[in-house]
Image: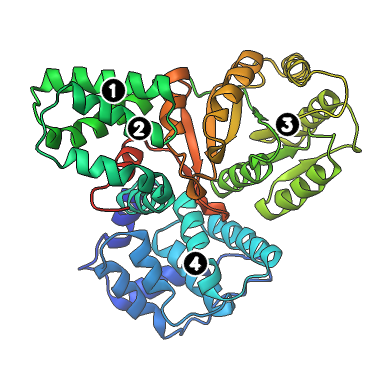
C-alpha cells in the first residue's frame, strides 16, 4: 500500500463520517481473527476516537503519526499491540498484514530483549516504513539525510576546514585554486587518480556553467557527485527465487549486512532464506543462524568445513521447495586451505547456475569504508572473479575515509546500493547519491 493511498484512506470522507461510524469501522477490522497472543481490544477503548481525530488532523508523515500513536505508551504491552493494530486498520491495511507484522515484531523484540518503547522506536518506524511502503516519501528521505549527515561527520571534518574556506572564498577559478582543491580531496582518501579526475570534471562543469569564482563551485560539486553516483536502469525481474551471492573479505560486516538485508526483505513481506556458505569459520555459521532467527528468515547450513558449493546447491534446493522469494548466500572472506578464494567463488556460481538458471542474479560486494584505498583493490579482485553487480559500503559512520565512495563510483561504475550507518537493523540505508553529496558538502558543519 503506497503512501498517498494510505493518506487518502486515512482522510477520506472526513466530514461525512461520524465518530461512531469511524469507531465501528476500525473495530470491524480489529475484530478479525488474530493469534491468541494478541487478543481483540476492548470495544470501548477511550483513546480511539481522539487518536483517530488526531491522526486525521496531523501532517501526513510517519514520524508524526507514530508520535501520536505511542503517546503515553512506554512498553510493548497489550496497549501497544492495540494501538499498532488500530493504526493498520486506520490505513485500511489488511488485517492479516497487521497481525503478521505484529507477530514478527514481537519475535524480534524477544530476541533482542527489548521492552521499553524508547529502545525500539526507531526500529519500529523503519519496519513500518517498509511494511506500509512509506520509505520513499519525504519523511524517510529526511531521516536518511540526517543519518548520512551524522555518518559522514568524520569524513566531512577531514574536508571541511580547507574545503569550506576554499569554496566560500571569492577566489578566481585559476590553476592555483584547482591544485589546492586536489590536495584537499586527497585528505578524504579519494585517492590520487580520483582527485585528478574529479577536479577535471569540475573544471569542465564550471566552464560550461560560466562559473568564475570559487563560491559557485559548491553546488556544481554536489551536482557532479550526484551524477557520478547515478546508476542506469537494469532488468530487476528474475525467475524466483532471486539468488544473491554476498562476497567480501573477513571483518567487513558481511554477516550483519546479510541479516539487515534479510530483515528488510522480510518486512516487505518476502520469504527469505539465508545460506551459511562460509563453512571455514564455525563462528560465522553460528552468528548467521542467530541473525536469521532475528530477521525472520529461514536458515540453511552444514557442518564446518563442508564444501561451500554443496551448501549453496542444497540451500537453493530448500528455497525452491519452500517457495522462497529471496536467497542470500554467504561466502568466505578467506580460505584456510590451499584452494584459491576466487576459484571457490567461481565454483559456487557455476553450481548455482546449474541448479537454477540465471542464478546468482546478483553478486554483491560488502566493503568496510574504514579500509580506504584498500577498498579499490578488493573491488578489482572480486569484480574480476564474480562480475559484481552492487557494492554495499559499511561502517561509513566510523571513518574519515568516506571519500572512497567517490573513488569506487568513478573507477568501477558499480552501483553503491546501501550504506551502513550504525549497528541497528535500520542503519543499513539505501544509498542516495544526491543525499550523499549534500551531506558531504553540508555548509557550516564539521
Disc 1, disc 2: CB below 8 Å?
yes
Residue at the disc numbered 4? 121
Q: Position of residue 354 (x, y in %)?
A: 76, 14
Distance Cα–Cα, label 4 vs label 2: 38 Å
Q: Earlier in the sequence, mark 4 or mark 1?
A: 4
Distance Cα–Cα, label 3 vs label 1: 35 Å
Distance Cα–Cα, label 3 vs label 2: 30 Å
Q: Nearer the viewer, mark 3 or mark 2?
A: 2
Distance Cα–Cα, label 4 vs label 3: 34 Å
Residue at the disc numbered 1? 199
Q: Earlier in the sequence, mark 3 or mark 2?
A: 2
Say whether residue 214 is visible: yes
Residue sitting at 52 percent across and 82 percent down? 42
Residue at the disc numbered 3? 333
Residue sitting at 58 percent across and 63 percent down? 102
Q: Earlier in the sequence, mark 3 or mark 1?
A: 1
Q: Earlier in the sequence, mark 4 or mark 2?
A: 4
- Circle 3 crowding by C-alpha within 10 Å: few under 14, some 14–19, many from 20: some
**Relative to 180, is 113 above or below?**
below
**Relative to 6, is 246 above or below?**
above
Residue at the disc numbered 2? 185
**Relative to 191, is 440 above or below?**
below
Amino acid at each position: 500500500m503506497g503512501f498517498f493511498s494510505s493518506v487518502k484512506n486515512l482522510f477520506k470522507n472526513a466530514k461525512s463520517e461520524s465518530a461512531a461510524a469511524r469507531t465501528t469501522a476500525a473495530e470491524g477490522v480489529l475484530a478479525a481473527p488474530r493469534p491468541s497472543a494478541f487478543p481483540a481490544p476492548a470495544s470501548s477503548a477511550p483513546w480511539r476516537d481522539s487518536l483517530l481525530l488526531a491522526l486525521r488532523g496531523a501532517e501526513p508523515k510517519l514520524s508524526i503519526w507514530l508520535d501520536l500513536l505511542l503517546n503515553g505508551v512506554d512498553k510493548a504491552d497489550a496497549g501497544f499491540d492495540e494501538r499498532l493494530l488500530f493504526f493498520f486498520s486506520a490505513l485500511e491495511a489488511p488485517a492479516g498484514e497487521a497481525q503478521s507484522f505484529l507477530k514478527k515484531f514481537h519475535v524480534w523484540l524477544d530476541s533482542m530483549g527489548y521492552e521499553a518503547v524508547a529502545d525500539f522506536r526507531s526500529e519500529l518506524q523503519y519496519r513500518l516504513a517498509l511494511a506500509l511502503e512509506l520509505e520513499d516519501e519525504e519523511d524517510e528521505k529526511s531521516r536518511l539525510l540526517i543519518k548520512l549527515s551524522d555518518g559522514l561527520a568524520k569524513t566531512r571534518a577531514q574536508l571541511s576546514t580547507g574545503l569550506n574556506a576554499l569554496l566560500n572564498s571569492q577566489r578566481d577559478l585559476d590553476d592555483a585554486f584547482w591544485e589546492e582543491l586536489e590536495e584537499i580531496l586527497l585528505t578524504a582518501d579519494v585517492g590520487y587518480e580520483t582527485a585528478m579526475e574529479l577536479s577535471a570534471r569540475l573544471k569542465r562543469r564550471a566552464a560550461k556553467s560560466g562559473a568564475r569564482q570559487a563560491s559557485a563551485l559548491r553546488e556544481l560539486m554536489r551536482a557532479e557527485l550526484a551524477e557520478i553516483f547515478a546508476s542506469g536502469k537494469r532488468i530487476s525481474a528474475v525467475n524466483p527465487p532471486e539468488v544473491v551471492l554476498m562476497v567480501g573479505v573477513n571483518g567487513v560486516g558481511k554477516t550483519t549486512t546479510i541479516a539487515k538485508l534479510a530483515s528488510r526483505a522480510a518486512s516487505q513481506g518476502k520469504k527469505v532464506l539465508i545460506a551459511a556458505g562460509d563453512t571455514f569459520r564455525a563462528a560465522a555459521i553460528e552468528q548467521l543462524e542467530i541473525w536469521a532467527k532475528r530477521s525472520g528468515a529461514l536458515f540453511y547450513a552444514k557442518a564446518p568445513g563442508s564444501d561451500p558449493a554443496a551448501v549453496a546447491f542444497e540451500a537453493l534446493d530448500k528455497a525452491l521447495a519452500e517457495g522462497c522469494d529471496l536467497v542470500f548466500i554467504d561466502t568466505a572472506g578467506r580460505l584456510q586451505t590451499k584452494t584459491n578464494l576466487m576459484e571457490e567463488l567461481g565454483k559456487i556460481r557455476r553450481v548455482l547456475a546449474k541448479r537454477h538458471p540465471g542464478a546468482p542474479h546478483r553478486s554483491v560486494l560488502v566493503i568496510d569504508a574504514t579500509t580506504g584505498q584498500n577498498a579499490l583493490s578488493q573491488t578489482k579482485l572480486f569484480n574480476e572473479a564474480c562480475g559484481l553487480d552492487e557494492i554495499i559500503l559499511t561502517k561509513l559512520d566510523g571513518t574519515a575515509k568516506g571519500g572512497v565512495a567517490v573513488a569506487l563510483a568513478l573507477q568501477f561504475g558499480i552501483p553503491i546500493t546501501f550504506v551502513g550507518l550504525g549497528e541497528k537493523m535500520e542503519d543499513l540505508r539505501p544509498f542516495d547519491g544526491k543525499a550523499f553529496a549534500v551531506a558531504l558538502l553540508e555548509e557550516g558543519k564539521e
